[in-house]
């Protein structure tokens, strides 16, 4: 597989992992840098990675790189300790597991409804509400102007609410 | 569902599922990769282009600066021990500073934060921008008029009354300075609230568009602040809901403006100004009547702010009157959007 092909196929996956870890610690630019680093590392070692293990490799590399970068960015001892705890994965209580599982399921249902909006509305909502991108940033990526993104976002939210109501999903 | 709820819920989504949607920055990241693989290594020694490199450098520089200052201070104190450390007082040198417990190293003259201050600092949301994203009115009736919204008195929230929707006023005196040539007051104005703390203001006459942001401060007075990024101006008012189709804004000098609900905000709808509708109407009728139209005037229907009344004057016939929608350019007997004219 060509490098660009690999990049296109796994970019969203790597970026999603990286941005989630860096959310509290870095900026969108940090996430982009880190994502680039992950792909550069994979491209350097491409000959040694089995194609069927590529996604797993990318996922692990993304997590490790992002945690390293988050530690670099958060020099304060308290933040570093907190990150270390997150990375080490404290054992959650039964209640935590149940709540997390419920929230993950709700998020899954929500994503299905967002996906049903079609593009580019789905991408706009995800970039705004998951990646916290500004209208200008979204517009630049989607080749639209910021006002159009705002308008589409507003309309998509309205449709999403209607869909959620119709699907009996209340929050 | 509020925007904040949507945001929070999505944070629990599995990255693998999120990966099904386009992430931002794809082309920028690819450009960064190709730049580096093509030999333009931004990590090359001596070339610093990355933010985190700057973070490292600034951290080290700050540490060095601190050490130098401490050393200089220590040297000064060693040279002038009697001036700085009379009696039994401890002379502050670099060694004593570094050896002292953390509590004594805290900078002086910084008042400790009270619990309330800490809470406020932690909870205060960012200044409302175009993407502040909170406070969408959630309930609308089928006829497009808002059902009674929940009044929230939290700080800095867009007003629930200003959820997504279009409102009309013909007396927006307080912000007349933002219009073209400072004359908004004489023209009717539409305020299109996108529902996320931002909106557009349109002049009915020529369609001049001005973006604005609004922030609802809540409290007993129900204060709302309008900001106009293009001019940097602000306008404050006290909001009063007269009924579900009218809002009164009272300004600090006690002048009032009344906004009338004009309809739902449709992001894809075009705002047709009076001038534009008049021009379209003239084109339309001239197309069929071989240039017999002498003049077309367009005025906003005083009873329905989303309608425009068009009067077509002919060279040798009696004038005719039509009504079309402000956002559709269509009426019962006239559709100005016909493509055959193009």
Image (cartoon, coloured by chain):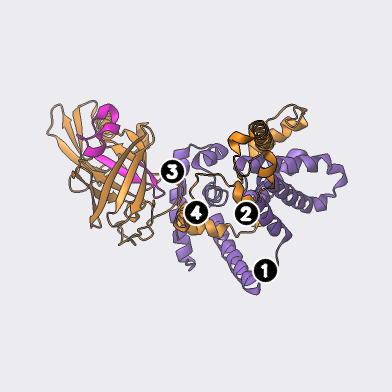
Chain colours: A purple, B orange
How many numbered marks are there? 4
Position in image of residue A139 (x %, y %): 52, 39
Which mark is nearer the camera, 4 or 2? 4
Image-quadrant location for residue A133: top right
Mark 2 and mark 1: span between their CA atoms?
Answer: 24 Å
Point out the residue furthest to the bottom here. A94
Mark 1 is surrounded, within 10 Å at the Cα level, by few (under 14), some (14 to 19) or many (20 or more) other residues, namely few
Decide which of tag 3 and tag 4 comes sooner along the chain: 4
On the rendered structure, is A158 left or right of A97? Answer: left
| Residue B327 appears in the figure | no
Which mark is nearer the camera, 2 or 3? 3
Q: Which residue is mark 1?
A: A92
> Where does the magenta region start and end?
B173-200
Q: In what quadrant of the picture does the C terminus of chain B appear?
A: top left
Position in image of residue B27 (x %, y %): 64, 36
Judge whether residue B178 is colored magenta: yes
Whether the residues at callouts 3 and 4 have beta carbons within 8 Å, the answer is no
Mark 4 and mark 1: span between their CA atoms?
Answer: 26 Å
Position in image of residue B316 (x %, y %): 13, 28
């Amino acid at each position: 597989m060509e490098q660009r092909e690999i990049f296109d196929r796994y970019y969203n996956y790597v970026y999603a992992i990286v941005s989630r870890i860096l959310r509290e610690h870095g900026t969108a630019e940090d996430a982009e840098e880190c994502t680039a680093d992950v792909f550069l590392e994979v491209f350097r070692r491409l000959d040694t990675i089995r194609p069927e293990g590529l996604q797993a490799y990318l996922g692990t590399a993304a997590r490790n790189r992002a945690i390293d970068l988050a530690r670099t960015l958060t020099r304060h001892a308290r933040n570093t300790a907190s990150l270390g705890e997150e990375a080490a994965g404290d054992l959650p209580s039964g209640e935590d597991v149940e709540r997390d599982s419920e929230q993950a399921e709700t998020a899954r249902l929500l994503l299905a409804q967002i996906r049903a909006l079609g593009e580019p509305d789905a991408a706009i909502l995800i970039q705004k509400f998951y990646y916290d991108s500004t209208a200008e940033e979204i517009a630049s990526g989607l080749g639209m102007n910021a006002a159009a993104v705002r308008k589409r976002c507003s309309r998509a939210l309205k449709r999403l609410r209607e869909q959620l109501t119709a699907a009996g999903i209340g929050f | 569902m509020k925007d904040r709820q949507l945001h929070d819920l999505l944070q629990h989504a599995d990255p693998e599922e999120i990966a099904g949607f386009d992430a931002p920055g794809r082309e920028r990241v690819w450009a960064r990769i190709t730049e580096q693989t093509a030999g333009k290594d931004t990590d090359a020694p001596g070339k610093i282009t990355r933010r985190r490199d700057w973070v490292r450098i600034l951290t080290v520089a700050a540490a060095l600066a601190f050490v130098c200052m401490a050393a200089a201070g220590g040297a000064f104190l060693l040279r002038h021990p009697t001036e700085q450390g009379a009696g039994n007082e401890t002379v502050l040198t670099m060694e004593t500073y570094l050896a002292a417990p953390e509590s004594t190293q805290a900078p002086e003259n910084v008042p400790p934060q009270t619990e309330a201050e800490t809470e406020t600092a932690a909870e205060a949301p960012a200044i409302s921008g175009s993407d502040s994203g909170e406070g969408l009115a959630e309930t609308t009736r089928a006829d497009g008029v808002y059902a009674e919204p929940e009044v929230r008195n939290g700080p800095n929230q867009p007003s629930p009354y200003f959820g997504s929707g279009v409102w009309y006023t013909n007396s927006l005196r307080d912000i007349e300075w933002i219009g073209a040539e400072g004359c908004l007051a004489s023209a009717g104005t539409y305020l299109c609230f996108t529902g996320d703390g931002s909106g557009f203001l349109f002049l009915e006459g020529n369609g001049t568009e001005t973006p604005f942001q609004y922030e609802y401060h809540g409290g007993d007075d129900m204060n709302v602040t309008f900001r106009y990024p293009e001019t940097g101006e602000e306008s404050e008012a006290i909001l009063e809901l007269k009924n579900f189709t009218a809002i009164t804004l009272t300004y600090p000098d006690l002048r009032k403006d009344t906004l009338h609900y004009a309809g739902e905000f449709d992001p894809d709808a075009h705002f047709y100004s009076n001038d534009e509708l008049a021009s379209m109407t003239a084109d339309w009728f001239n197309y069929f009547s071989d240039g017999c139209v002498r003049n077309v005037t367009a005025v906003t229907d005083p009873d329905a702010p989303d309608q425009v009344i068009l009067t077509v004057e002919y060279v040798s016939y009696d004038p005719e009157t039509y009504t079309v929608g402000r956002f559709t350019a269509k009426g019962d007997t006239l559709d100005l959007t016909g493509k055959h004219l193009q």
